[in-house]
C-alpha cells in the first residue's frame, strides 16, 4: 500500500485559539502553515478575518494568505488545487504541513479525493436564481436552498449569493448536494485533525470580546473600504456587510455591531456542527484546560512516529 503523506490539521470555530496553537506547534515540529480560511486569501482584509500579524507569525511561513485581490473570486476548487500544491512543496523541504482554519468544506475538499459537484454549468438555471435573488433577496434565496439541500444551506452564509446559487444549480442538475460526493471519498493524506472547542457560553463570550477588539483595531475602516468598492465575493465576509446599513444611515453603530456578534456566533455553531458530523477529529478544550496541551503534543508526536498510510 502506498504510504500517505502526513498533514497536521487544526480546525474548529472562530475565537478558540487555532492561530496561537498552530504557531506554537509549527515551531516545535518544524512546520509551515497553510491557511484553510476562505476570507484570509484577500489582501487588506486583515482585522475582520483575524489574520495572524507578522509579529504573531514569529517567522513561521504562512501560505494562502493575501493571495487574492478584493475584486477576485476564490473557490473551493482553487483552494483544493493550491493547497495540495503547497503541501507537496512543504514536504519537499522536509517540513511538516500544518493546515489551519475553520472553513470545513475547504479542509474536507483538500484532504479527500472527491469532485466538488458538477463541473459543467447551465447559464439558464443560474440566471433564473439570480433573478429570484434580485426580486426576493438573499435570505429567501437561502431559504430555497435550505428546503432543497439543507446540508449545503447549513454550511453557506445566507448573504453569500454566489455560493447559494452554485449549490442550487448543482442540486437541480444532478439531484445531489454539492457537498455529497457520488462515491465514498478516500483520504489523500495521513492526517491528524486537532479539533478545538470549548464551552458554548464561554465561546460566545470570546467571540463578542473578539469583535470589540477588532473594532478597536480598525475593523470599521476595513468595512468602509469594502462598502466603497463593493467587490462581489470578498464583501460577503462576516464582520463587513453588517456595517453597510450603518454606512447608509439606516441603522446605528450599536445595532450593526450586535449583528456582527450574532452572525459570528451563528457561524461558530455551524463550524462546530460541520467538523463534528463530517470529519474525524481529536477534540481538545485548551481554553478551559490549557494543561492538556502537553498530552495533545505527545499524541501528535506519536502520530508522526507511526507508519500508517
Image: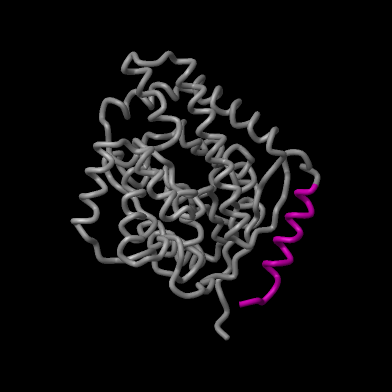
Q: Position of residue 290 (x, y in %)?
A: 77, 42
Q: Position of residue 97 (x, y in %)?
A: 54, 60
Q: At x 43% / y 59%, what residue is drawn?
A: 83
Q: Which residues are magenta?
A: 292-309
Verify whether residue 103 appears in magenta.
no
Query: Is residue 35 in sight in this rendering?
Result: no
Q: Is residue 19 left or right of residue 39?
A: right
Q: Is residue 35 left or right of residue 123?
A: right
Residue most extreme to the front = 147
User: Vertical placement of 193 versus 257: above or below?
Assistant: below
Q: Position of residue 52 (x, y in %)?
A: 52, 38
**Chief secondary structure of the magenta portion:** helix
Verify whether residue 300 appears in magenta.
yes
Label tally: 0
Query: Is residue 141 in sight in this rendering?
Result: yes
Q: Is residue 57 left or right of residue 229?
A: right
Q: Quadrant of residue 240?
A: top left
Amino acid at each position: 500500500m502506498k504510504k500517505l503523506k502526513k498533514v497536521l490539521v487544526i480546525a474548529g470555530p472562530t475565537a478558540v485559539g487555532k492561530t496561537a496553537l498552530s504557531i506554537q506547534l509549527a515551531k516545535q515540529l518544524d512546520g509551515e502553515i497553510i491557511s484553510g480560511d476562505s476570507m484570509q486569501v484577500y489582501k487588506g482584509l486583515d482585522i475582520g478575518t483575524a489574520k495572524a500579524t507578522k509579529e504573531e507569525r514569529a517567522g513561521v511561513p504562512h501560505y494562502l494568505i493575501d493571495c487574492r485581490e478584493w475584486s477576485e473570486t476564490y473557490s473551493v476548487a482553487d483552494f483544493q488545487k493550491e493547497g495540495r500544491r503547497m503541501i507537496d512543496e512543504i514536504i519537499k523541504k522536509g517540513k511538516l504541513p500544518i493546515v489551519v482554519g475553520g472553513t470545513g468544506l475547504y479542509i474536507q475538499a483538500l484532504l479527500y479525493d472527491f469532485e466538488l459537484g458538477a463541473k459543467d454549468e447551465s447559464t439558464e438555471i443560474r440566471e433564473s436564481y439570480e433573478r429570484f435573488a434580485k426580486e426576493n433577496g438573499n435570505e429567501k434565496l437561502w431559504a430555497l436552498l435550505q428546503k432543497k439541500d439543507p446540508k449545503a444551506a447549513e454550511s453557506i452564509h445566507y448573504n453569500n449569493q454566489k455560493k447559494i446559487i452554485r449549490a442550487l444549480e448543482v442540486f437541480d442538475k444532478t439531484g445531489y448536494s454539492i457537498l455529497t460526493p457520488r462515491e465514498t471519498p478516500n483520504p489523500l493524506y495521513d492526517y491528524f485533525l486537532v479539533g478545538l472547542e470549548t464551552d458554548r457560553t464561554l465561546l460566545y463570550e470570546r467571540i463578542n470580546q473578539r469583535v470589540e477588539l477588532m473594532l478597536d483595531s480598525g475593523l470599521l475602516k476595513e468595512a468602509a473600504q469594502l462598502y466603497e468598492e463593493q467587490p462581489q465575493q470578498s464583501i460577503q465576509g462576516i464582520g463587513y456587510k453588517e456595517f453597510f446599513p450603518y454606512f447608509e444611515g439606516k441603522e446605528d453603530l450599536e445595532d450593526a455591531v450586535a449583528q456582527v456578534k450574532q452572525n459570528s456566533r451563528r457561524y461558530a455553531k455551524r463550524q462546530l456542527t460541520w467538523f463534528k458530523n463530517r470529519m474525524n477529529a481529536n477534540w481538545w478544550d485548551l481554553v478551559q484546560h490549557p494543561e492538556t496541551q502537553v498530552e495533545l503534543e505527545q499524541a501528535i508526536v506519536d502520530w508522526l512516529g507511526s507508519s500508517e498510510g
